Image (spheres, rainbow, N blue to C red):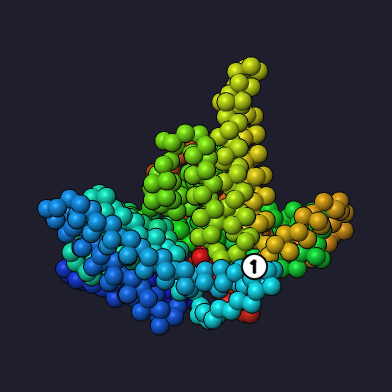
Amino acid sequence: MTFNSPNFLIFFPIIALIYFLITPRFKWVWLLVSSYYFYMCWNPKYIIVIIFSTIVTYITGLLIHKSNFVIDKKKSIFYKNFFLVSCLLINLGILFLFKYYNFFSSIVIRLGASLDLTINFPTFDYMLPVGISYYTFQVISYLIDIYRNDIEPEKNLGKYALFVSFFPSIVAGPIEKAKHMIPQYNSVHKFEYNRVKNGLIQMLWGYFKKAIIADRIAFLVNTVFNDPSKYFGYQIVIATLMFTIQIYCDFSGYSDIAIGCAKVMGFSLTTNFKEPYFATSIKDFWKKWHISLTSWFRDYLYIPLGGNRKGKFRTQLNVMIVFLVSGLWHGAALTYILWGFLHGAFQVIENLLKPFKKNLIRKFKIDINSFSYKFGQILFTFVLVNFAWIFFRANSIHDIKIIFKNMFVNNPWIFTDGSIFDLGLNSTEFILSIISIIILILIDYLKTKFDLLDELSKQNIIFRWCIYIIAVLSILLFGVYGSGYSAQQFIYSQF
């Protein structure tokens, strides 16, 4: 049941309505049952995996906390370490089995073949459980926070299970922390008109980005990237630019819908995007893109590795490790690892060149607050991010080689002979895509200047409702669906 499916558009209003009508004592129970039902709509048998992970981490959290009260400090530390490491191995082992086992076993087999050794591994022929990368990271953060004494374990198994499986965020995040979410399950959330309205508006914006932009330009992106040997020069450049927009609209659209859903019912999820394509550096980009994942890696990998506290070399090494792991987190393929490596390398180079950059600014008296300087920073960062997306979207290393081989063919005539409309979108669909992208850029730019929701709420009721009606009609009239179309899965739900 995807967010953009008819089933969800029936499911969510019913869940929200009953949530507001039932007694506060049973609200969390209703949400837990609803979340498990939502998850089982994807593949019922995988509910066993999430329940197993929930019970194991719940018990481990209690045991880690109990270890604090062992009088012998050495034993206390030993027990805490033992329980934490054991549970991490169990959860990461499950994730490895489903997501990485076949990938790494194939690498070992190929390495063995190169040494004239015959190595065989049994294949693990099961689909990747939806959301496993997200809820695994959530339960890991929960355990580590207890281990660090940042939080106490949740005593109510049901409320902890809700934290793991909360339906707005279970499929593709945001990746939440227990100290942010679990207290919200203990609060009473009543119907509040302004909050519900703002939640629905955020959902509407998410549907606009998904249905009108992402799903439409997906046809162009898939046409080129799924058969790159047939396309050259500007065709590949256009497809790459379009994928840059597609993945942003697809993922941030999902996040907007998820955050909006939660907001309607009174819950606050972590903001996951802050206009990332207006970032002025790669480091700034990762403060604005998939924020919940970035903060997770910072708190539970980068800082434990030493962060920037152990010298310049270790700092840059830690950055590279984080981004290589981030690339692997996104998928079991060398293309994702290369994508992570590129972002790590970009950031390391930025860090190393920072003193040189400051000297240039001082020597040439460059006004870093000028429009031209900021625009140049944004444009340069966008080009780097766009370049890296090629590795993320390409189906294989072989395809990457073809893409770069064909990319530098000069074919400007595609803009005049109509062949630009042979990339999966006809002229009408292509122009509609451009118009919707311009609207996206304008809205995102305005969001960097002020709170659009707050400004909209200050307008008179007629103007506001005109905006709402135009937005709904636009999605109904220009969204990609209808005969021969099935709701496309959100890209990040595959991870």
Residue 434 or 48: which is nearer the viewer? 48
Name which residue lies at 80% across and 62% down: 231
In the depicted structure, whether residue 70 falls above or below residue 311: below
Q: Position of residue 470 (x, y in %)?
A: 52, 58
Q: In front here: 368 or 300? A: 300
Q: Is residue 201 left or right of residue 26?
A: right
* Residue 393 visible in this rendered orientation of the protein: yes
Whole-percent x, y for residue 67 in the image: 18, 58
- Say which element carries label 1: helix
Q: What residue is at 83 percent from the left and 62 percent from the top?
A: 419
- Quadrant in which residue 31 is drawn: bottom left
For this rendering, which residue is in front, 317 or 57? 317
Image x and y of residue 88, in percent: 36, 63
Q: Residue 196's image quarter?
A: bottom left
The answer to whether 91 is drawn above or below residue 383 in the figure is below
Is residue 383 toward the left or the right of residue 178 in the image? right
Closer-to-camera residue (4/89): 89
The amino acid beneath tag 1 is Leu
Q: Quadrant of the N terminus?
A: bottom left
- Determine which residue is flagged by label 1: 111
- Residue 456 is at least partly visible in this image: no
How far across and how far down the image is residue 23, in percent?
17, 69
Outermost residue, front side? 116
